[in-house]
Image: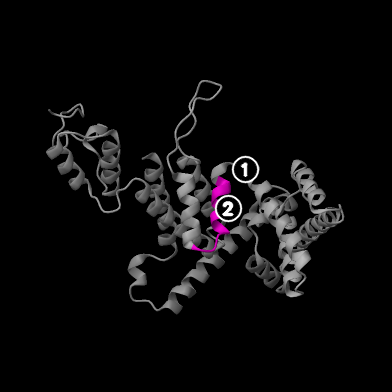
Amino acid sequence: RETLRIMLDAVTDIMKQLAKSIPPELMKDMTPEEIEMIQYQKVMDGYEKMYESIVDSDEKMETTVLSLYDQMDRQFLDLVVQKASSGDETAEKISEIVQKAMADRMQSAADRLRVCLTAGPPDAMVQKLYDFVQAGELDDAFLLLLAGNLDQAKKAQNDNAVKILTILQRKTMELRDQQVEPEVALVRQLLRTETEDARKSILRKALAVKKKVMLSDGSQSSGTTVDGKKLVAAMRKLIEQFGNVDSTLVERVSMIGTEAEDVARELFDIEDKDIQDIQDEAFHKRSVSVFDLERMEIEAEISGSNAPWTGQSDSPPPGFDKSGRMIM
C-alpha cells in the first residue's frame, strides 16, 4: 500500500515538473513545433541558470565547475563556446576547465580499460573490474569508453571483441549498481531498458510484496525489494539535478513513474475497482480483510480524499464503526 501511494506521489511530482515547463492551458492551442520550441527554450534557460551559478559562486571557479561537471552536456558546452567566441573571458575559463576535466577523465578511463583488456582471459578482465570498483574508478567515463569500443567492434563485425566487451559492459553496470542504494540502481536499470514490457517486468519483481523475515538485529526485512520512499527520492533527485537541462530525461522518468503506478495497481488488484465498489462489497459481505482496508485507503488517496479511519474524517465507511471495526 505504501509503495503504491509513493508511486502516485512520484507521478504527481514529476508531472508538476512537466507542467512547469509548459502550462496545460497554453498547450491546447499550440502546434507540436511550438511546444518543442518552448521546451527547447526552457532547456536553454536551465543552461543559462547553471552558467550564472558558476559565475556568481563564491567558491573557486574550478571547484564549482567540477561539482557541476556531471550535469553538463553537449548543449551546455555549445552555449559556453558561443559565449567564449563573443569575447566572454569567464566562458573561456569555464570551457578550459571542462575540456581539461574531460580529457583527464577519458585518459584515466582509457588507461584502466587498457589494463582490463590486457589482463588475460575474460575471468581476469572481470577481476580487474572488481579492483576498479573497490578503488572507486568505475566512473561514467569508463562506461562511456567501454560503450564506444563495443560500438566500434559491432561495426567492424568483430564477434569475439563484441562478446568480451558486452560481458565487461554488463558487469560494469552491475558493479556500479551494487555501489548505490537498490532504489537508485532500479532507476538506472529502468532508464537503460528500452521496452515498456521489459521495464514493467523489472518493476513487478521490485514492487511485489514478499514474505518478511526476521533479521539478526531483531528487525524485519522489507516486504519489497525496494523502499518506496527511497525510490521516489531517487527519481526526484534526477529531476532536481537534470530536469532543467535535459527535458528528455524528465519525460523518461515521468514515463517510468506512470508505469510504476500501473504495476502497483496491478499488484494490488485495484485496476478496475473504485472505493465505492469495495465499500459496498464489504458492507454486503459483512467481512473484510486487511488487504481490502488497505485498498480502500489507496483508492481514497487516488480520488483525492481520505479514508474515514485515518482520523481525517468524522464518519466511518458503510459497515464500520468509528474505530474502524466491522459492524456485525
Q: Which mark is residue 83?
A: none
Report the magenta stretch's main SS.
helix
- Tell me the residue at 55%/57% (across/down): 191
Range shown magenta: 184-195
Indicate the quadrant where residue 292 lies: top left
In the image shown, does 326 or 38 lie closer to the viewer? Answer: 326
In the image: residue 280, left or right of residue 93: left
Residue wearing tag 2 = 188
In the image shown, does 257 or 71 lie closer to the viewer? Answer: 257
Q: Position of residue 47 (x, y in %)?
A: 59, 63
- Vertical side of 156 occupied by 6: above or below: above
Report the coloring of the rendering.
Answer: one colour
| Residue 185 part of the magenta segment | yes
Instruction: Name the image quarter holding the N terminus.
Output: top left
Q: Position of residue 167 (x, y in %)?
A: 71, 56
- Please name the amino acid that badge 2 sits on: Arg
SS at badge 2:
helix
Indicate the quadrant where residue 91 lies: bottom right
Are the residues flagged by discs 1 and 2 in contact, CB closer than 8 Å? Answer: yes
- Number of other residues with Cα within 10 Å of mark 2, as a class: few under 14, some 14 to 19, many 20 or more: some
Q: Marks 1 and 2, Cα distance to the nearest angstrom?
A: 10 Å
Q: Position of residue 224 (x, y in %)?
A: 46, 39
- Tell me the residue at 65%/63% (across/down): 73
Chain-order first, disc 1 or disc 2: 1
Instruction: Name the image quarter holding the C terminus.
Output: top left
- Vertical side of 137 occupied by 106: above or below: below
Q: Which mark is residue 180?
A: 1
- Please name the amino acid that badge 1 sits on: Val
